[in-house]
């Protein structure tokens, strides 16, 4: 999920000679022609372009985003299937799980999938961070607004519902599950790798 630490640890792996595929950046590159016409750039502006699930433009933009994400992932698969490619880390988006079973199976087939799992306490922090520092989040069909709710109240309730749904899906494809609390940021990348090896 966004803000769980995927890019933090991927960058640390890059520092020890892993090729880093940052899917957020690659999707943004594909969206650049659209973003440029709006004067947008950067991950926060990708979020602004997509909108929130209560915005009229959201459904269309969400599907467009997922289409670009599928293209990005297929491009990565084409590169890493070469046996001489070397070590790589695929820094997926949190929405990779919504790209379809076929693509998720391909990801599992060509890589070791690590799921960094959030506790309920961390999930609350992630939601606050999502509101403060927006990133594009695919809600699929999870969002709905009850008559007694404001849009923001519905967003908070459905964000938690989305986390619950995704946690099941992430676990389904994961080779290794690491609780977020176990990998606090003071751990070295070598400690992280040792932890992963012990859990395989």
Image (spheres, rainbow, N blue to C red):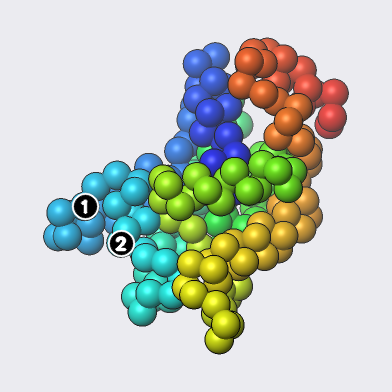
Tell me the residue that label 1 is attached to: 40
Which quadrant: the C terminus? top right
For the point 56% across and 51% down, the residue is 127
Observer-nearest of 143 and 199: 143
Observer-nearest of 181 and 67: 181
Image spot of residue 173 (x, y percent)? 74, 52
Image spot of residue 64 (x, y percent)? 39, 68
Left or right, 83 with respect to 67, comes to right
Mark 1 surroundings within 10 Å by alpha-carbon count, few (fewer than 14), some (14 through 19), many (20 or more): some
Q: Is residue 134 visible?
A: yes
Residue 122 to residue 168: above or below: above
Image spot of residue 50 (x, y percent)? 36, 64
For the point 73% across and 54% down, the residue is 167
Q: Is residue 82 visible?
A: no
Left or right, 29 with respect to 171, comes to left
Instruction: Give the residue at the far bottom of this rendering.
Output: 147
Residue 27 to residue 85: above or below: below
Residue 25 to residue 192: above or below: below
Contact? badges 2 and 1 (CB < 8 Å) = yes
Tell me the residue that label 2 is attached to: 49
Gap in angstroms between the C-alphas marked 2 and 1: 8 Å
Observer-nearest of 89 and 49: 49
Observer-nearest of 181 and 113: 181
For the point 46% across and 63% down, the residue is 66
Q: How many numbered circles does the render carry? A: 2
- In terms of secondary structure, where does tag 2 sit? helix
For the point 57% across and 82% down, the residue is 148
First reached walking from the N terminus: tag 2 or tag 1? 1
Mark 2 surroundings within 10 Å by alpha-carbon count, few (fewer than 14), some (14 through 19), many (20 or more): many
Image spot of residue 189 (x, y percent)? 63, 16
């Amino acid at each position: 999920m966004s803000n769980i630490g995927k890019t933090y640890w991927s960058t640390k792996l890059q520092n020890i000679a892993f090729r880093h595929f940052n899917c957020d950046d690659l999707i943004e590159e594909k969206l650049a022609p659209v973003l440029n016409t709006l004067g947008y750039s950067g991950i926060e502006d990708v979020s602004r372009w997509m909108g929130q699930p209560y915005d009229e433009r959201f459904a269309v933009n969400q599907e467009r985003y997922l289409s670009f994400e599928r293209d990005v992932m297929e491009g990565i698969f084409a590169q890493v299937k070469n046996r001489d490619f070397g070590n790589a880390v695929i820094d997926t988006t949190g929405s990779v799980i919504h790209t379809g079973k076929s693509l998720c199976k391909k990801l599992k087939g060509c890589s070791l999938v690590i799921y960094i799992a959030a506790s309920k306490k961390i999930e609350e922090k992630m939601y606050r961070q999502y509101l403060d520092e927006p990133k594009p989040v695919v809600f699929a069909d999870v969002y709905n607004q009850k008559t007694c709710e404001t849009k923001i109240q519905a967003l908070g309730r459905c964000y938690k519902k989305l986390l619950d749904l995704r946690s099941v899906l992430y676990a389904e494809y994961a080779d290794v599950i690491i609780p977020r609390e176990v990998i606090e940021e003071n751990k070295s990348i070598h400690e992280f790798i040792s932890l992963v090896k012990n859990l395989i």
